[in-house]
Image (cartoon, rainbow, N blue to C red):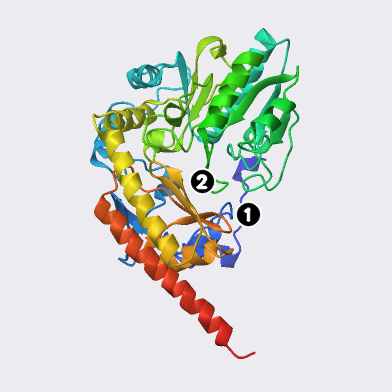
Amino acid sequence: MNLFNLRRSAPAAVAERKPAPVLEADAPLARERLMAGSERAAQVFVRGQGSWLWDNAGHAYLDFTQGGAVNSLGHSPSALAKALGNQAQALINPGAGYLSRGLLALVERLCQSTGSDQAYLLNSGAEACEGAIKLARKWGQLHRNGAYHIITASQACHGRSLGALSASDPLPCNRCEPGLPGFSKVPFNDLAALHAEVDSRTVAIMLEPIQGEAGVIPATREYLQGVQKLCRELGILLILDEVQTGIGRCGALLAEETYGVRADIVTLGKGLGGGVPLAALLARGTACCAEPGELDGSHHGNALMSAAGLAVLDTVLEPGFFEQVQDSGRHLRDGLSRLAGRYGQGQVRGQGLLWALQLQEHLARELVEAALQEGLLINAPQADVVRFSPALTVSKGNIDEMLLRLARAFARLHAQQQARRVMPA
């Protein structure tokens, strides 16, 4: 008997089954298919240009988040679109075990422009921070009798991989608190606390120049320079997480330049790809100790990502670009300060084109929603903080328009509060 000739007759219901209807990508059922990895607004965006986004209903939104500082040149900048289009026709990904011209060109450009000795390309800032941790611990094996302990700051957020989460504070980004060993956290901007935590196990201090997810809290110049001096005196590494502050966000290629310090290891991400997943790990001096196989990844430094990074670097390194960022940043800071005074809010803090407005009450989420109703996109890293990270190419006209819409959002929020107060029980 040939078993392959046996066929079971299909049930009538199955035999008569009709093909499932094709659903629009933004249909309600399609939304239910999306795993709840992060909170998302209801809008479905279909097009972007510069500082503006349009949804599938044709409504325009002024974007002052830019993907959390990811879209460094704004939405669909021509330089990036052209570079990606040309590269996609030539070569996308030769494979992790092979080189491409774009990979070598971007690594060379990064090292030259940042004064680094080596660079490695990755997909995300979390991976870059994970790589920095691995690199520091490898250095500890070679140069500090196997030291592996890394000191970070309270409220730090270095990404969402397991190692990066362990280097971060439980809030705002480490809700599950996996707690890998070998990390400790001390108050930010407290040099004495940092010094007291260092011992023979310590291999590195890992800090953000500006704590973005904590509410845009800048390190003081005295603190960061003191940390650098401490690292040099004690023979440990300084790691700066510049995933959010690098690539011109603070008015210089790296925020470390504005503080007058020089780290041993620097992590980059977000704005480096201009919207394309791209990150980098930079190393200097003896921190260049990685060996083949220790930082592998299937997409690391592929030709398409490298083309994006080169296009972004070519743009931000043009003469006068950083001065323009600084000028636009001052315009944004002054406007936010006026609004804060008018509506009785708190401190405006930040640098370059990364700013936060401290609110007097825990109403950041409500303000973000009110702004959304006014066609303005901002975000709330903390319950009492709203953050602004526009495109580095944002115009002063767009900044003024944002301030008008934010003022209307404050008025809308105030009206809602008043209505709730007078509503009968």
- Few, some or many residues within 10 Å of mark 2 (<14, 14–19, 20+): many
Residue 144 visible, this orientation: yes
Q: Which residue is mark 1?
A: 8
What's the distance in space between the residues labelled 2 and 1, CA to CA?
65 Å
Q: Image quarter for residue 193? A: top right
Query: What residue is drawn where x is 43% and y is 74%?
Result: 412
Q: Image quarter for residue 90? A: top left
Q: Which residue is mark 2?
A: 216
Question: What amino acid is found at the position of numbered circle 2 in the picture?
Answer: Val
Q: Earlier in the sequence, mark 2 or mark 1?
A: 1
Front position in the image: 58 or 68: 68
Instruction: Please state the horizontal and vertical placement of residue 156, each as a whole percent of the image.
Output: 61, 39
- Few, some or many residues within 10 Å of mark 1 (<14, 14–19, 20+): few
Which image quadrant: the N terminus?
top right
Query: What residue is drawn where x is 49% and y is 62%?
Result: 345
Outermost residue to the bottom:
424
Left or right of 148, for residue 380:
left
Front position in the image: 352 or 172: 352
Question: What amino acid is found at the position of numbered circle 1 in the picture?
Answer: Arg
